[in-house]
Image (cartoon, rainbow, N blue to C red):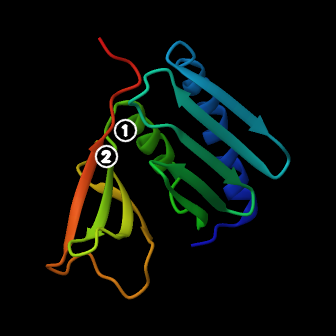
Amino acid sequence: MIQPQDVFNREYDATTAALDVWAATLADVASIEREKTPTYWRLSMRPSEPNACAVELMLSRNQTYDLELANVALTNEPVLDFSLFRQLLDAIVGGSVISRSWSAQATGTELMREAVVPLADGHDWLIRRILHAGTAPTELSALASDHVFLPYRRA
């Protein structure tokens, strides 16, 4: 649902400011890039831990966002709830990302990729990219392979 632009802008400014402060606390465990322009704010995090999940988030003043993680991307998705972004980033930094690849059992052809992010509230957030139209991974002929990422900070 599109918000009045002035309401959106207030939440956008508060959220991006809070995420800037939060991201700065990860400088010891990740390469952090932040960019702010009049039309968008972008955060890119490349963890020092090689088996942790890199992420890039871009929030736009046109009330959309782009997100890339675990070899899957969303573009121009509507911003429905600003609190989602901190939840997602906390889960990613905590190592709660599953990269799932679905392949045809007979040929090994990759059919679909998913990134599943279990959130602290018990819900899973999901990005799905279908690589071959007309294929459904729920068919008995598809196999799933999961890769689980590590936390950015390890004890």
Residue found farthest to the front: 107
In space, the residues marked 1 and 2 are separated at their CA atoms by: 6 Å
Which sits in the foreground, 84 or 139? 139
SS at circle 2: loop
Image quadrant in which the C terminus is located: top left
Q: Quadrant of residue 32?
A: top right
Image height check: is 34 above or below 41? above
Label 1 environment density (alpha carbons within 10 Å; few <14, some 14–19, many ≥20): some
Q: Residue at x 23, y 49 (%)?
A: 122
Residue highlighted by disc 1: 91
Q: Residue at x 43, y 22 (%)?
A: 49
Residue highlighted by disc 2: 119
Q: In the rendering, at what x and y percent does residue 93 appear?
A: 41, 31
Q: Which three-letter amino acid code belongs to the residue tagged 1?
A: Ala
Q: Quadrant of residue 95?
A: top left
Which sits in the foreground, 150 or 11? 150
Image quadrant in which the N terminus is located: bottom right
Q: In the rendering, at what x and y percent does residue 58 appear?
A: 66, 49
Image height check: is 147 above or below 142? above
Which sits in the foreground, 150 or 110? 110
Q: In the rendering, at what x and y percent does residue 51 appear?
A: 38, 30
Q: Residue at x 24, y 55 (%)?
A: 145
Q: Which three-letter amino acid code belongs to the residue tagged 2?
A: Leu
* Drawn side of residue 52 relative to residue 146, left or right: right
